[in-house]
Image (cartoon, rainbow, N blue to C red):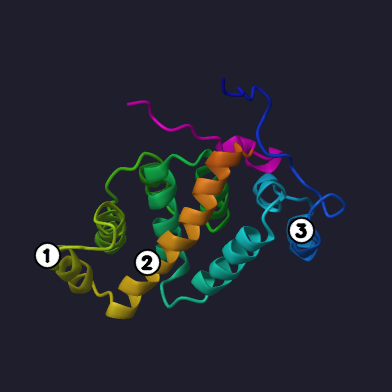
Amino acid sequence: MSNVHTEAPFATLTAETAPEDSRPLIEGAQSAFGYVPSPVGKMAASPELLAGFMQANRLFQKATLAELEREVVVMTIATHVGCHYCVAMHTALLTKQQAPEDTVCSLRGAEPLDDPRLEAIRRFTLAVIDGGGAVSREDLGAFLDAGYTERNALEVVLGIGTYTLSTFANRLTEAPLDEPFEPFRWEAASN
């Protein structure tokens, strides 16, 4: 006989209730956002996961890819996986960055982008995800022909790895959307 859990999974932890190694990470998020984002509170149950995501994200932010290109990678994996939180949060970030509205709408809809260079990174991201890293020479060639470099290709892998941690954790823990991101709520299309 199996136990059926009907309660919401994974408590949202605070600096007071989290494992000791998660506390400084929660406090840092509180300082940066003015509140503890629910994914941080949920991931805090594993200090290793929370620290790993935060460190990987810091490294991804230092990548040579432009800010909008990094957001294309994040939104591509978030819509591919169906992460409600990441799509809403990164829509808010794109809006704050004054990204073109058609670009944001296309990213939210997992649709091709009008900008050829951004579409090249979106398509390459999908090729890396779908191939588990094994992309065809044609896919890599199209990416490089769009003006990207081998370093950029590896930075896409870093972005995918970083946001695989986040999107999977958010979905597993059912991280609720925080109020600041409600105007950007997103739900995966049903198949």
If the image is split into quadrants, where does the C terminus sit?
top left
If the image is split into quadrants, where does the N terminus sit?
top right
Q: Is residue 80 visible?
A: yes
Magenta part mainly helix, strand or loop? loop
Say what amino acid the circle numbered 3 marks.
Answer: Ile
**SS assignment at label 3:** helix
Q: Which residue is mark 2?
A: 157
Q: Nearer the viewer, mark 2 or mark 1?
A: 2
Say what amino acid the circle numbered 2 marks.
Answer: Val
Q: Residues within 10 Å of mark 3 (few under 14, many from 20)?
A: many
Q: Residues within 10 Å of mark 2 (few under 14, many from 20)?
A: some
Q: Are marks 3 and 2 in contact (CB under 8 Å)?
A: no
- Spot occupied by residue 3 in the image (x, y as percentages of width and height): 61, 24
Q: Earlier in the sequence, mark 2 or mark 1?
A: 1
**SS assignment at label 2:** helix
The quadrant holding residue 143 is: bottom left
Q: Going by the picture, which residue comes out furthest to the right? A: 16
- Spot occupied by residue 172 in the image (x, y as percentages of width and height): 55, 40
Q: Give the spatial CA distance, label 3 vs label 2.
A: 26 Å
Residue 26, which numbered label? 3
Residue span colored magenta: 176-191
Q: Are marks 2 and 1 in contact (CB under 8 Å)?
A: no
Say what amino acid the circle numbered 1 marks.
Answer: Glu
Q: Which residue is mark 1?
A: 138
Q: Answer whether residue 178 is magenta in the image.
A: yes
Q: Nearer the viewer, residue 136 or 65?
A: 136
Q: Earlier in the sequence, mark 1 or mark 3?
A: 3
Residue at figure coordinates x 79%, y 65% from the top left: 24
Q: Residues within 10 Å of mark 1 (few under 14, many from 20)?
A: few
